[in-house]
Image (tube, helix red, strand yellow):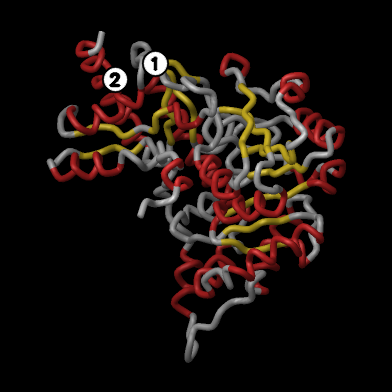
Amino acid sequence: MNPSRRIQALGVSPIRHLAPLARKAEERGVRVLPLNIGQPDLPTPRAYYEAIRSFDAPYTPYAPSQGLPELLEAIREDFRVRGVALDPESILVTAGGSEALLFSLLTLCDPGDEVLVAEPFYTNYNFFADTAGVKLVSVRTDPEEGYALPPDADLEARLSSRTRAVLVTNPNNPTGTVLPREDMERLGRFAARHDLFVLADEVYRDFVYREGGFVSFGELEEVRDRLVICDSVSKRFSACGVRVGCLATPRLDLAALALKLGQGRLAVSTVEQRGAAALYGQPPSFFAEQREAYRVRRDALVGALSRVEGVSCRVPEGAFYFMVRLGVEDTSDFAAWMLREFQHQGDTVMVAPGEGFYATPGAGRDEVRVAYAIAPDLLVRAAEVLGRGLEAYRRLRP
């Protein structure tokens, strides 16, 4: 008996597929500096742990499929203070932002339907789309133009009779781009003109470093009748291991349909939801301090990379990622070589090859995505080691 063609066709994660090589490097005594993944090392608020420790019951029951009432209200209030009004029934608690995205695609699309997405895009969208039987149709953006939203004509050229939605990540992973309000409004008009849903992945909304801050698609009245927002506690509260997120939509009919999926998987962890509800009680100063910490890290890494010969990148406006051109032909080969064969004074670097963030064949082969989620001194050291590795690699593969 053979495994399914579906599972065999799924691609590997460019973020995690090099992990076995990293473990082997560590077993050899090499320190691996992780630029490949957005795993923040800032402290998780103590309120989370206190809420978990205070849980005391004779048994641990299922939570309601929609979510614990205290968490649903905390999420709703968080949206309200940001200018997004939602009904209590508009929110579904999910097992992280990943489940929110998968549930959204299953709610909005039939098998064989298509979703427009600007590339480069978060690589795991491929997994969610393949699982849902949905085809991602990519529209290229240009780094020389700041990965700006493509013109309507470019978007329209990629439409078909099966197009159901536009998927937009704002702030963007992997580019660090933040959409200006005028582009969001243009995208809303485009979606209305072509009767498309807008699926907004806003998990990095608290990390915007430019003037003007963040604008949610939920604030745009012209989009609300076709909008689904995905959010998560993972990055906002430096709590990646807390697999709690949400799907939120002003459309009560969509929320009710998505709840069928929530009921099918019963519930998100009762205990984790209690902890997540406590996370939402952070004061505004918490997010200001987080933003400043990531701004310092961004500047440290961008500055250090600017001193590496042959490397080019743009300064990201949000999230904690950006794409980097390394000046080598195949960054997948380079990334694996760094872990298998290279170390400088006991250190090597793990990056995410850029090709996995594109749908266009061959695109991104000279790029990597880097994350600035570790301490500034480690980021500077990682850039130094990366530069040394590039020098050695170019000598081997001129």
Q: Position of residue 344 (x, y in %)?
A: 18, 27
| Residue visible at 43% across and 18% down in the picture | 325
> Image height check: is 180 above or below 72?
above
Q: Position of residue 178 (x, y in %)?
A: 64, 32
Tag 1: amino acid? Val
**Upstream in the sequence, badge 2 or badge 1?**
1
Tag 2: amino acid? Gly
How many marks can you see? 2
Residue placed furthest toward the left: 28
Nearer the observer, 42 or 102: 102
User: In the rendered view of the protein, which quadrant contains the C terminus?
Assistant: top left
Nearer the observer, 368 or 262: 262
The answer to whether marks 2 and 1 mark residues whose Cβ atoms lie closer than 8 Å is yes
User: In the rendered view of the protein, which quadrant contains the N terminus?
Assistant: bottom left
Examine the image and state in which quarter residue 94 appears: bottom right
| Residue visible at 39% across and 33% down in the picture | 352
Examine the image and state in which quarter residue 199 appears: top right
For disc 1, the marked residue is 311
| Residue visible at 61% across and 50% down in the picture | 101
Q: Is residue 26 left or right of residue 302?
A: left
Residue placed furthest toward the bottom: 58
> Image height check: is 244 above or below 210?
below
Q: Position of residue 201 (x, y in %)?
A: 64, 44
For disc 2, the marked residue is 387
Label at residue 153: none
| Residue visible at 21% across and 16% down in the picture | 392
Q: Is residue 167 left or right of residue 350?
A: right
Q: Position of residue 323 (x, y in %)?
A: 48, 26
The local crowd at label 2, few if under 14, some if 14 to 19, many if 20 or more residues have their Cα within 10 Å, is many
